[in-house]
Image: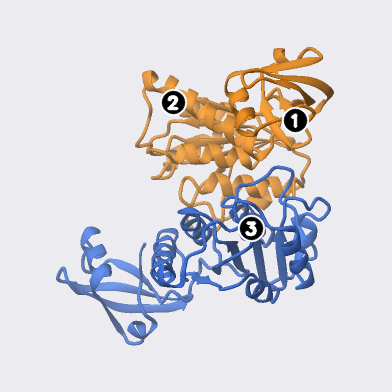
Chain colours: A orange, B blue
Amino acid sequence: MVRFFAQPEELAGDSVILTGENAQHAKVLRLKSGEEVLVCDGDGQECLCRVAEFDGKELTLTVCDRRDSVTEAAVRVSVYMAFPKADKLEHVIQKATELGAYEIVAFPSGRCVSRPDEKSLKKKLERWQKIAASAAEQSGRGRIPQVIALGSYAEALSRAAQADKALMFYENEQAVTLKMALSGGGYQTVSLLTGPEGGLEEKEVEQARAAGLQVCTLGKRILRCETAPLCALSAVMYDAGEF
Amino acid sequence: MVRFFAQPEELAGDSVILTGENAQHAKVLRLKSGEEVLVCDGDGQECLCRVAEFDGKELTLTVCDRRDSVTEAAVRVSVYMAFPKADKLEHVIQKATELGAYEIVAFPSGRCVSRPDEKSLKKKLERWQKIAASAAEQSGRGRIPQVIALGSYAEALSRAAQADKALMFYENEQAVTLKMALSGGGYQTVSLLTGPEGGLEEKEVEQARAAGLQVCTLGKRILRCETAPLCALSAVMYDAGEF
């Protein structure tokens, strides 16, 4: 079924009017009266609607049913990624959204080569949020993960540490596997923290331990900085019973 | 440690001489006499060597030890992917190699938009194999996964079906999860088969069942054709105890 995202306040009444990009999309899809579509508020609620009228500019929908999104994961996984170079963060935002991440949090660390300044950050965040929205739509999610940029490594640690399972992946860790770290189950929130191209510094790993994160391995092969979070996210979703 | 790949026959004696791209790489790394390096035969065997001499063109190494690669996964996972568009297959080859895939097998299916003709295929296979070699080197693998292109869907099914766990992922399957399909463990070989951009046709899914593949889901979200195999591969490696 075709899926649109709209602001929660637009979904309050018995009918919904979509304009702008949504209407353009409806035009491309040649939506006709009577067809069923889903309109999501981007925060886990969705309305099953029927097309009442479409004049090419305004899509008027009648709300048939309201429900919690059925495609959101029960587990809330936050992906914490040290700022990587160029388009790697965009890649991770797109893929992590598809894979069901709750939010994507970028932060600076010692070996980050790329660290956007405040001026460019605002524009970049807009762009990143659009990538998440587009991936959420395409993958059929009911929620658009928020993309957040933090100002310091310390902030990332203290925020990540609040999850039921707060995990950092480090290539020099060999003893503790992700499976060990997740054993026992029963977790509802998970933070997955990974480093930039050059990896995390040893002192950063110690800081993470001190902040309460569990340091673990993703196996014997060295994963690229854009591969590690997606591998970990896939495994956590699997462990949590998502597929 | 720096890692080179060489032909098995070059690793037969007490010393190894590396030339060409390997020597260029050594030059970039400014390798000096006495330094330890690893030379892999690309098939799971590796030699721990010490630099004896390097004149900028020929790198002469003394073999100190021979061993099975310690970074290869015990489970052999074959990634079967219907030919996708453009650079998506290259992406999957790179990432699947990092994630420890045993081999990557591309095949045609009904909704494939891109299907290389025989003439261009030879060149493409060379290029794909180079991507696998480069990713194997970077991720520290002892084996370069082979990239294989099959001529028909039927061939892909009968080849994939030979694994202990032969799995196909289909977005309309809801009952059987990957976890159910892997339950019981004890598998040594796994085939993971995924469709192209437009998905697999229903009759193709039936053909797969008939060939002995287990059809299962990767969860409630629709994954892009390049995301699905990597998600499944990560989960299988996790299930098999790799991390």
Q: Are marks 1 and 3 in contact (CB under 8 Å)?
A: no
Answer yes or no: are tags 1 and 3 on the same subunit: no
Q: Is label 1 in contact with label 2 (beta carbons under 8 Å)?
A: no
Residue A145 is at least partly visible in this image:
no
Q: Quadrant of residue A37?
A: top right
x%, y% of residue B95? 50, 56
Say which of A240 and A53 sits in front. A53
Amino acid type at circle 1 is Val
Looking at the rendered image, the disc whose residue lies closer to the viewer, 1 or 3, is: 1
Which residue does the numbered mark 2 point to in the structure image? A124
Q: Mark 2: give few (<14), some (14-19) or many (20+) Cα within 10 Å.
A: some
Q: Which mark is residue B195?
A: 3
Residue B77's x, y, as percent? 61, 67
User: Depth check: B87 or B179 in front?
Assistant: B87
Question: Going from the N terminus, do you reach mark 1 or mark 2 first?
Answer: 1
In which chain is the residue bearing label 1?
Answer: A
Instruction: Tell me which residue sits at (23%, 74%) in the image.
Output: B19
Residue matched to label 1: A37
Labels 1 and 2 share a subunit:
yes
* A64, B40: nearer the viewer: A64
Q: Return the residue found at the far left.
A: B55
Label 3 element class: loop
Q: Residue drawn 43% across and 41% down?
A: A196
Identify the secondary structure beneath mark 1.
strand
Task: Identify which amino acid the numbered label 3 is placed on.
Answer: Gly
| Residue plotted at (62% across, 28% down) | A27
In front: mark 3 or mark 2?
Answer: 3
Tell me which amino acid carries mark 2: Lys
Chain identifier of the residue bearing label 3 in the image: B
Q: Which of the chains bears the disc numbered 2? A: A
